[in-house]
Amino acid sequence: MPDTLTDSPSTTAANTAKPVLSVRNLSVSFPGRRGTLKALDDISFDLAPGEILGMVGESGAGKSMTGLAVQRLLEPPGQISGGEVHLLGQRIDQLPETQMERLRGKQIGAVFQDPLTSLNPLFTVGHQISETIRVHLGGSRRAAMDQARELLRRVGIPSPDERVDHYPHQFSGGMRQRVVIALALAAQPRLIIADEPTTALDVSIQAQIMSLLRRLCDETGVAMLLVTHDMGVIAQTADRIAVMYAGRLIELAPVHEVLRQPRHPYTRGLIGAIPALRKRVPRLTQIDGSMPRLDSIPQGCAFNPRCPEAGPRCRTHRPELSATPAGKVACWLNDGGVA
Amino acid sequence: MKPALVVRDLSRVFDVSAPLLNRLIERKPKTLLRAVDGISFEVPQGGCLSLVGESGCGKSTVARLVTGLYRPTDGKIEFSLGDSGDRIQAHMIFQDPYASLNPRWRVRDIIAEPIRELGLRDGESATRARVDELLGIVGLSPRDAEKFPHEFSGGQRQRISIARALAGEPKFLVCDEPTSALDVSVQAQILNLMRSLQDAFGLTYLFISHDLSVVRHMSDRIAVMYLGRIVEEADTEALFDNPLHPYTRLLLQTIPDIEAPRPDVAPATGEVPSPLKPPPGCTFHPRCPEADDRCKRQVPEVLDAGHGRRVACHRVAEMLERNGISALSA
Amino acid sequence: MTLRVDGEPVLTRPSRLARMRDSDLWYSFVTHRGAVVGACLLFALIAAAFAAPLIAPQNVYDSAQLQLMNARVPPIWLEGGRWPFILGTDIQGRDVLSGILYGSRTSILIAVSAVVLSLVIGVLVGLAAGFFGGIIDNLLMRFADVLLSIPTILLAILASAVAMDMLPSSWRALGAAGVIVFAITLSNWVQYARIVRAQTSVERRKEYVEAARLLRVSPRRIMLRHILPNTLTPVLVAATLSFGMAILAEATLSFLGVGMPASLPSLGTLIRIGNNYLFSGLWWIVLFPVLQLSLLVIAINLVGDWLRDALNPKLR
């Protein structure tokens, strides 16, 4: 099924440019004493320059795992057990670790949930940013420091000339996350992987950081894989949504399409479960049960035991991602199909 | 009918100073944190009042004051729930489904603890039967009683936590961010469960959350907190339709709205100041687009804005003086 | 009201043994070669020590069994060695193997007593310090620091001198054992107290403790029923590892002469006695007790190291 593998990017910019990141049939498995667990199962997607792809799903669905696998930061015994990852046309899933390490700072920037894990408490933020610039782009110490100031200004840190000389602990949570974003951008990467970048922050700060990320992607053309459990954050920021369930990609489409007309019953449930802001309903739509553990994923469609629309085919055969008018969905009901 | 809970001028100050010896050497004064600063509210029988605000606003401290886990520095907390006596008035559902259940106890013992401690059932077999019944009420099975907490998912653990709270046969439940650690689809299950329990047992809720969409779904009335004070309190619909306080407006603006995303709206700037060094005057003034000199100097009084609304803001007060209460409903 | 049960298959609960064999702990044990070797060795050594009256060729406490004609017999594989003195005899005709078996039993009993006593004291002090905090915490932990600054051996010599002076001669052996247990405990309990205190001050802030406090459960019950079970894992690991240290400490004290008397020898006593004849060519009197001591400590540490790794959540 070659046609299910080709992506249908949403923006016009994405149509013309080559993808920054291209993931093909990626699988990640964890060999263990009770057999091998498949944490990611046959994931394929593309990411165009300047595009934000929001990856949603419940905890354990594999959304963070996808980000880690792309960066090759899986914790052993986890390993990529199949598929390919291409960054700017170069295949990176088999690169030796030394080359991968260079790539990670230079081409791929990372923003994590807890800003403190990305910052060294012993150095000033200016030092950390300028060192990153010098390692990856070269240049003099002074020029790098000037660039660091410029970066801090761009991520919205007030009086950057003073702040470059401050240590991470002197920043508040929201400001710290801005510093991490500046650090991620320091080497002018082409791809940013942001894993729950706003989960630890207060709501009002969360909106600030998301709008900053959106603006940076638009201005610099950096592509972003935004991993989050918060549909609201994605609705606000992303161009396309990728919905994960039990290690599989089950729906991939432009944001407004998914929000207007979710195709997969799980996506419908996920959106219905969010309490509405405009009207009050006596009962929220709920998806009964919980996501299966990786060692007991049911046969057929992984969602079938919880799916209100499941039919006999869903229990025996696994649906592949197939094209919809705007995106792709892995459901037998797609396109007038019968479950 | 009398309100189920009346809170008057409640304050709680924490001493967060360095140890005595360090303080003497470094010649530093005591550091006091006013977590809750003279707040008043009422919760009607069978209703649900929500406290919302960002981290450090004191909402969790209020939850612990109401349940008696902390002693108030000042102010009054009065329950009137009919039959009282010495009984514990308010039970609690906690935020973290992992830390709120003792990992070394079986689920049966966790749920039975309130029954045993409060002597609500005579004998072991009656207690067992009650635990099985409670498990059924929260949507688990009696088989689960013999398991340990780590065998459950986050949502199931929160159900156990609810069963434990119900075991004390409370009329009043304090819910401290009960769904903030859960995934959305599980959150919906828990919120639905809590709503149906409220109807089934006539419970009164004090609901603590930072998530306005959850709060809107659960509560009849909302109190918005900022740095230890209530800045606005109103019925849910009124608050969402016509927020008066600039901070409430900011909060409402920042919730991502999945029905109508507004990526182009510039978000509010600034962050919550440290509660150790709150700004003078109205504590919100550094972030407030409408602040003037008076806001920097003078703490605004909480004033009645009609229709059961209360707001603490100089701007709103001035508007009231000029145009009367009718100006607010515009 | 429709309340649905989360979908979970009906499981019949397996037996306790089957569950243990299925557990991760058991799996990590059988795949850890050092742990298996250590555990088997430890079991064998302890079993042999406690079966001493049944398997030892000689009752070393019964001086009537000692005959000078049996003195200075070398181990059985050397010229002049003879049955039943497999590892030879000392200058009084005491069988070295029997001495080791009986001596190990004494050493193990003393070490176990010392560790258990330290555990009880350490856990209680740690719980109280961690739970109440503030002044109680400061007083208890500073007292512990002071104790740690006193050298154990000096203290034991002092205590032993006092005890020997006060006790009637028939009580001396027991008194000596008591002095050793006391001396080891005095320096040993502090580490447990520190571990438990740190763990307790983390646990007491958790929400399950708040849930109990909300019910007005007494502090004593919260400490013992709620917090204690959650602090025990690291303490038991530490106790296993320090069991080896306690055996060595006992040997050191007995070697220095403040420990067990020659009539009721421990491993340390045997080594002390044997040490006197090391240069008279009677090397077996000292070598075999030393070997036994090393084996015992190595076996304990193998098990302890595995336990520490297996129960450390960070390494899993």
Image (cartoon, rainbow, N blue to C red):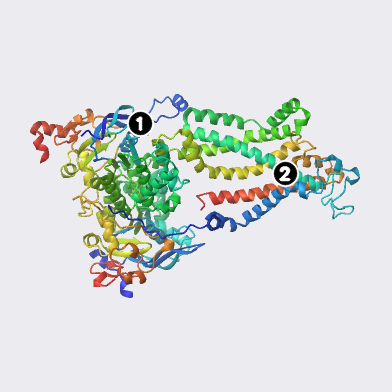
- The answer for how far apart the CA atoms under marks 2 and 1 are is 57 Å
The label on residue C195 is: none
Q: Secondary structure at mark 2?
A: helix
The three-letter code of the residue at mark 2 reads Arg
Relative to B133, residue A166 above or below: above
**Foreground residue among A295 and C147:** A295
Chain name for mark 1: B
- Viewer-side label of 2, 1: 1
Report the side of B56 relative to C154 (left or right): left
Q: Secondary structure at mark 1?
A: loop
Relative to C218, residue C316 above or below: below
In the rendering, at what x and y percent does residue C156 appear? 70, 31
Q: Give the class, few, some or many, for how many residues have Cα within 10 Å of label 1's Cα (few <14, many ≥20).
A: few
Residue position for label 2? C105
Report the side of A183 relative to B221 (left or right): right
Q: Quadrant of residue C216?
A: top left
In the rendering, at what x and y percent does residue B311 appear? 19, 34
State whether residue A167 appears in this view: no
As drawn, which residue projects farthest toward the bottom? Answer: A1
Q: Quadrant of residue C31?
A: bottom right
Residue position for label 1? B86
Q: Quadrant of residue A327?
A: bottom left
Relative to C21, residue C56 above or below: above
Report the side of A189 relative to C118 (left or right): left
Q: Are marks 2 and 1 on the same chain?
A: no
The three-letter code of the residue at mark 1 reads Asp
**Foreground residue among A121 and C100:** C100
Relative to B24, residue C287 above or below: below
**Foreground residue among A324 and C60:** C60
Q: Give the class, few, some or many, for how many residues have Cα within 10 Å of label 2's Cα (few <14, many ≥20).
A: many
